[in-house]
Amino acid sequence: MNTNGHKDVIEVTDLRRVYGGGFEAVRGITFSVDRGELFALLGTNGAGKTSTVELLEGLAPPTAGRVRVLGHDPYEERAAVRPHIGVMLQEGGFPSELTVAETVRMWAGCTSGARPVEEALEIVGLGKRSGVRVKQLSGGEKRRLDLALALLGRPEVLFLDEPTTGLDAEGRQGTWELVRELRDAGTTVLLTTHYLEEAEDLADRLAILHEGRIAATGTPEEVTASQPSRIVFDLPDGYFLGDLPPLAELGVTDHEAVGRTVRLRTHELQRTATRLLVWAERARVELGGLDIRSASLEEAFLQIAREASGATKAAPEGPRSGATARKGAAV
Ligand SMILES: Nc1ncnc2c1ncn2[C@@H]1O[C@H](COP(=O)(O)OP(=O)(O)OP(=O)(O)O)[C@@H](O)[C@H]1O
């Protein structure tokens, strides 16, 4: 199969998934992932991430809409797609009596062009654990074994479903580094995660799912830019809020004062910060506890989820223009 001609390695159009009982877990989502791109699917519990990823992996057919991976339908043309993808599921489930090396060897037997067992284990930092039985591994080590199996066939496309859940901080950093290296070497990666700093750090683009729909999408910077930055400081002794320049003139959209601490929100961080600091300089006062920062992806995520919940309650089946149009990026 010639897989090199496709810029969009993953294409998802108006995808829907309805489970047996009639519950619609995925409600018409559209996105694409370019070759060599790392795309993160984020969302609250039950948002539909795993339901979506399973369709991309060809584990089930969509109820409606279209999925293409490397130009093929992953369910109907499984044989064409499977050799080129690596899958790390949320729950691996290995025979617990086998050793780590035996598990990888068994898997390698079913994988065309598999890496040598030792290489696969070294990559994920399990080189020294090859003789240990799977049941004796820690939760984090089992996740790394999962990752070794996903990487065994040198996949062009890698699906990682919550790859760092259960890992300690060091293990998480190690996995991030490895995923970054794979991406830099040209592997296309689709990642689901609950760790927002993971998405902020790794993702070229991301989508936030909420109740089966895309509530926001774009680069991490685009998604966070939709949220106001904030400036916090203590009013100097003898000064009141009214002594500051008019807040509208500073570009402030929202403010609160608790005791002497003032919190300003702004979509024009540079303008607001500059005017505030020029004012302080001229007044020859110091702004104690000064903290100036852009919104984090976590703040953006929480706000978008809140807005999306509000929109769902207001119009359960209606269009979600308020939540998506603001983000500006194509879905
Ligand atoms: N086999 C199934 N039958 C019926 N409903 C299901 C089935 N699998 C999942 N669901 C429901 O579909 C919705 C989406 O589930 P899904 O596992 O895709 O969410 P998720 O975003 O991956 O959640 P999490 O972050 O908790 O893993 C949930 O409400 C879930 O209860």
Image (cartoon, helix red, strand yellow):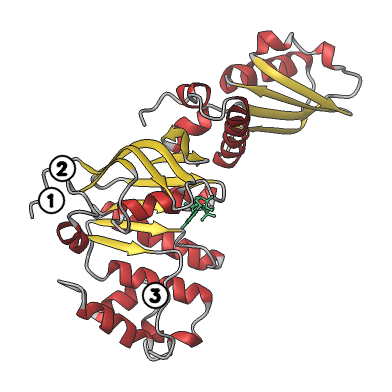
As helix, strand or loop, the secondary structure at mark 2 comes to loop
The mark total stands at 3
Q: Position of residue 222 (x, y in %)?
A: 45, 30
Q: Left or right of 34: which side holds 226?
A: right
As helix, strand or loop, the secondary structure at mark 3 comes to helix
The amino acid at mark 1 is: Thr
Instruction: Please state, as top left, top right, bottom left or bottom right, where the N terminus lies in the image.
Output: bottom left
Which residue is the extreme one toward the left?
2
The residue identified by callout 3 is 145
Tell me the crowding category of disc 1: few under 14, some 14 to 19, or many 20 or more residues within 10 angstroms, Cα based.
Answer: some
- Write the residue at 36% across / 32% down: 331
Q: Is the CB–ligand 1 distance for label 1 below 8 Å?
A: no
Q: Position of residue 314 (x, y in %)?
A: 62, 25
The residue identified by callout 1 is 3
Report the front residue among 68 and 167.
Answer: 68
> Is label 2 in contact with label 1 (beta carbons under 8 Å)?
yes
Q: Is the CB–ligand 1 distance for label 3 below 8 Å?
A: no
The residue identified by callout 2 is 6
The amino acid at mark 2 is: His
Q: Quadrant of residue 299?
A: top right
Q: Give me the C-alpha separation between circle 1 and circle 3.
A: 28 Å
Tell me the crowding category of disc 3: few under 14, some 14 to 19, or many 20 or more residues within 10 angstroms, Cα based.
Answer: many
